[in-house]
Image: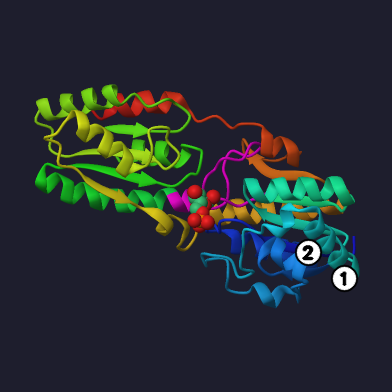
């Protein structure tokens, strides 16, 4: 292996820079040339390659976002786009690619490998934590701590007014963020996409709280919940409980920013280094992760198609502890 490329694609996640740094410095350690590709798969198609060295990744381990920029690239979903990407990689004599991203990034990587057989390793960069084959994804720990900080602040004002707040968190189709911040923030209810939401049961929970003269109540709603986002959920509840005067907050993209936590930097460093190692060992078409504190490889297809379950027991625990 002489030349590799590294890119970040899809939603940025805190810790992506730490992962880029690990990829570059591990490659340099092995005497491999590295090219950074700007804007993910879009950059592969447009030929946005820049040689990188140890110095290019100085002072980035603590920075949020991604120095390589990112994009959600429609063109790469079509055979023509992937062919252009392959031709550009061939022109640069690239023998392996590290693609840092989430589900969409992995799906594109799997398709690309299937068509051209160029070794590609996926590194799990998404705040959603929804990738199979790794206990955690890069950015998840930072995102839940950012969300929790906001939720704690919301609790202060909610408590002062004895108010009920509905707070929407990200996660796409997965409830990992909602579940963890809900439990950690002492939420009275947590709505996750993995379980059907019964609004009558939610109303009963809230009424129990009001009956017990509970001060504030917080409901954490995962954006992908089947009852809808916070506004939809509240509208539906208000049809049944007119007296409800809740406040709604959508935490949104603040969950994606900020300096990565120590856990995210360590995870990013380990999987970044591991991805290069995997390429040098001739691995291809795999996603790297950490399971039970050990580097773990699964096929890109499994990482995309297998479902990582949320721990439903935590929902029960959160309900018990918030009564
Ligand atoms: O996948 C990361 C994520 O932040 C999801 O949680 C969210 O649904 C989505 O990206 C938002 O994407 P965009 O930044 O394109 O609006």
Judging by the rendered image, the residue that carries numbered circle 2 is 5
Of pointers 2 and 1, the one earlier in the residue sequence: 2
Label 1: state its secondary structure: loop
Q: Nearer the viewer, mark 2 or mark 1?
A: 1
| Residue at the spot 47% in from the left edge and 38% down from the top edge | 176
Judging by the rendered image, the residue that carries numbered circle 1 is 92
For the stretch drawn in magenta, the main secondary structure is loop
Is residue 283 in sight in this rendering? no
As drawn, 138 above or below 187: below
Q: How many marks?
A: 2
Disc assigned to residue 158 = none
Could you classify mark 2 by the number of other residues whose Cα lies within 10 Å: few (under 14), some (14-19), or many (20 or more)? many
Quarter containing the C terminus: top left
Q: Which residues are magenta?
A: 123-143
Label 2: state its secondary structure: strand
Provide residue 105's location: percent of width, then percent of height. Answer: 67, 51
- Which of the two residues, 237 or 48, is positioned nearer the viewer here? 237
Residue 229 sits inside the magenta stretch: no
CA gap between label 2 and label 1 equals 9 Å
| Residue at the spot 46% in from the left edge and 61% down from the top edge | 257
Q: Are marks 2 and 1 in contact (CB under 8 Å)?
A: yes
As drawn, 207 above or below 172: above
Provide residue 196's location: percent of width, then percent of height. Answer: 42, 25
Q: Could you tell whether 164 is left or right of 66 in the image?
A: left
Provide residue 188's location: percent of width, then percent of height. Answer: 26, 32
């Amino acid at each position: 292996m002489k030349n590799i490329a590294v890119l970040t694609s899809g939603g940025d996640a805190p810790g992506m820079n730490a992962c880029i740094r690990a990829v570059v410095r591990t490659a340099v350690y092995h005497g491999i040339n590295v090219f950074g590709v700007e804007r993910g798969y879009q950059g592969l198609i447009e030929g946005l390659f820049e040689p990188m060295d140890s110095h290019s990744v100085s002072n980035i381990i603590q920075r949020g976002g991604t120095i390589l920029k990112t994009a959600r690239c429609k063109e790469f979903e079509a055979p023509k786009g992937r062919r252009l990407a392959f031709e550009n990689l061939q022109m640069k004599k690239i023998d392996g690619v590290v693609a840092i991203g989430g589900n969409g990034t992995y799906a594109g990587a799997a398709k690309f490998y299937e068509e051209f057989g160029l070794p590609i390793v996926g590194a799990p960069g998404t705040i959603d934590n929804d990738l199979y084959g790794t206990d955690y994804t890069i950015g998840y720990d930072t995102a839940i701590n950012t969300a929790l900080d906001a939720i704690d602040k919301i609790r202060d004002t909610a408590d002062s007014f004895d108010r009920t707040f509905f707070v929407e968190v990200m996660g796409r189709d997965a409830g990992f963020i909602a579940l963890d911040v809900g439990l950690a923030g002492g939420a009275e209810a947590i709505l996750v996409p993995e379980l059907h939401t019964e609004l009558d049961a939610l109303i009963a929970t809230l009424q129990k709280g009001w009956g017990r003269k509970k001060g504030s109540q917080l409901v954490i709603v995962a954006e992908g919940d089947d009852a809808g986002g916070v506004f939809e959920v509240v509208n539906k509840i208000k049809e049944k409980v007119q007296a409800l005067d809740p406040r709604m907050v959508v935490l949104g993209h603040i969950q994606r920013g900020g300096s990565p936590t120590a856990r995210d930097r360590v995870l990013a460093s380990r999987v970044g280094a591991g991805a290069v190692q995997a390429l040098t060992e001739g691995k291809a078409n795999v996603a790297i992760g950490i399971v039970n504190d050990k580097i773990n490889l699964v096929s890109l297809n499994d990482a995309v198609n297998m479902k990582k379950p949320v721990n439903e027991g935590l929902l029960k625990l959160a309900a018990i502890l918030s009564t």
